[in-house]
Amino acid sequence: MSKIAIRKSFEPRLYYLTILLNATNAVLKVNALIDTGCAKSAMSKLTYLKLLSQNKNLQLTQSKARIQTCDGTNHTIMGFVKLIIQFQNTSFQLDDQYIMVIEQLSDDFIIGSDILGSDVVSKIQTPFIHFNHNGKNIKQEMTLVMYPQLCLQAIKNLVIRPMKSFDVSTKIKDFSHMVTPIIYKSPFPSFKISNIAFEDDKIIATFQNRT
């Protein structure tokens, strides 16, 4: 059996902006992830269902488009919703935004490069994002969230037989719960993380060979 070494890594720095989603008689406040690496702004299925509970006539435009997430996996989107994005302490808003609805999205909402790379954003200078509205500068303050990160690093070749799994258990301290992005890259498509569990003072990652 291969040995597994656990090492501490950098702490990812993520910025969020509090916004209001206005979808015709449905208004919802969310913390939106600012992500220049995301080509198209998106919301989770749960966020869409919250809006739908306020407006039963909220239209979801069906789509067969597929996207590739940061872990390399492909997903079919549920469709697009047309809405207005509003901001705090200003009348400035983004009209007629077509937002993807993705079933498996870890954040409630992502503001992607379709907005961040457009003329409406003049600059992003943390912790502020600056919008351009008819020549006026609209400044909105973002919230910084840092995720402590643990990396699993194999120091010998790990061999898992077809349809078998291997658990890696790591003791950690001072965590009451864990909500964190998972990024996994492998040259072997069948080698996947099939489960992440948090029990007492341990985090358990299950690796599985799905061939």
Image: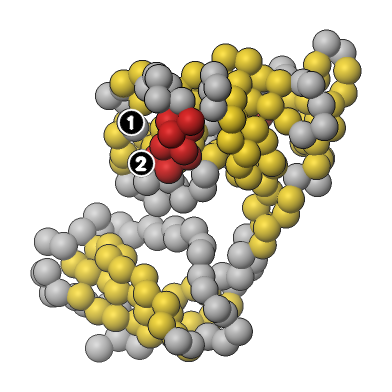
Residue denoted by label 2: 103
Q: Can residue 167 be seen in this view?
A: yes
Relative to 163, 34 lies left or right:
right
Up the image or down, 175 lies above or below 102; here it is: below
**Quadrant housing the C terminus:** bottom left
Q: How is the image coloured?
A: secondary structure
Where residue 41 appears, as percent x and y from the top left, is: 53, 31
Near mark 2 (Cα within 10 A), the count class, few <14, some 14-19 or many ≥20, is some
Relative to 127, 119 lies left or right:
left
**Helix, strand or loop for disc 1:** loop
Up the image or down, 181 lies above or below 79; here it is: below
Q: Can residue 83 be seen in this view?
A: no
Which of 171/79 is in front? 79
**Type of the residue with mark 1:** Met
Up the image or down, 195 lies above or below 57; here it is: below
Where residue 56 appears, as percent x and y from the top left, is: 40, 25
Tag 2–tag 1 contact (CB < 8 Å): yes
Residue denoted by label 1: 78
